[in-house]
Amino acid sequence: MSAPTTPAPGSAPAEAHGGHEHPPDRVYVYIALILAALTGIEIALYYIEVGSAEIPALLILMVMKFVIVALFFMHLRFDSKVATRMFSIGVVLALAVYIGALSTFAFWS
């Protein structure tokens, strides 16, 4: 019989989190740095003149940041495939609505 393992300091047992282990804290620091870099790129795109590529680039960055936050901070990465599919459908529908709203300003103004 093996000795029971104790969770790392600052982490809870797997049973408390739906049966999955959380990544170490350094992973969340890396994710925060990635999100900060993507935000910096978004801000730079606002000030740099890139022409008609600005809106698609910002939309791509927006979706990338949303997916990263949902995967790690909302723990979607550890959920079932059904939840991931529902999330993906929701992202696609939200993006379609957003693009539709943006197109009304471009075509009917």
Image (cartoon, grey):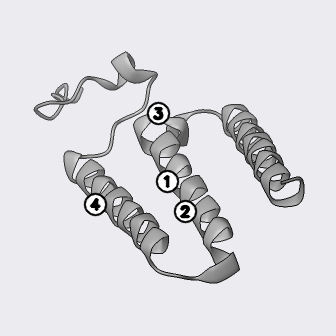
Question: Alpha carbon of mark 2 to alpha carbon of mark 1: how far?
Answer: 6 Å
Q: How busy is the neighbourhood of tag 3: few (under 14 within 10 Å), some, or many (20 plus)?
A: few
Residue that appears at 49% across and 53% down = 65
Residue topped by disc 3:
74
Residue that appears at 54% across and 37% down = 76
Q: Percent from the top left, x then y, of residue 106?
A: 81, 60
Pick the front one: 85 or 64: 64
Residue topped by disc 4:
33
Question: Alpha carbon of mark 4 to alpha carbon of mark 1: how far?
Answer: 12 Å
Residue topped by disc 1:
65
Element assignment for label 1: helix
Q: Percent from the top left, x then y, of residue 63?
A: 60, 54
Looking at marks 3 and 2 on the same chain, the residue that comes earlier in the sequence is marked by: 2
* Residue 107 picture quarter: bottom right
Residue that appears at 74% across and 37% down = 90
* Residue 37 picture quarter: bottom left
Element assignment for label 2: helix
Of circles 2 and 4, the one toward us is 2
Residue that appears at 63% across and 60% down = 59
User: Residue type at mark 3?
Assistant: Met
User: Residue type at mark 4?
Assistant: Leu
Of circles 3 and 4, the one toward us is 4
Q: Are the residues flagged by discs 2 and 1 in contact, CB closer than 8 Å? A: yes
Lateral position of residue 59 relative to residue 39, left or right = right
User: Residue type at mark 2?
Assistant: Leu
Q: How busy is the neighbourhood of tag 1: few (under 14 within 10 Å), some, or many (20 plus)?
A: some
Element assignment for label 4: helix
Q: Percent from the top left, x then y, of residue 77?
A: 52, 43
Q: Quadrant of the C terminus?
A: bottom right
Question: Alpha carbon of mark 2 to alpha carbon of mark 4: how far?
Answer: 15 Å
Looking at the image, the residue that sits furthest to the right is: 108
Q: How busy is the neighbourhood of tag 2: few (under 14 within 10 Å), some, or many (20 plus)?
A: some
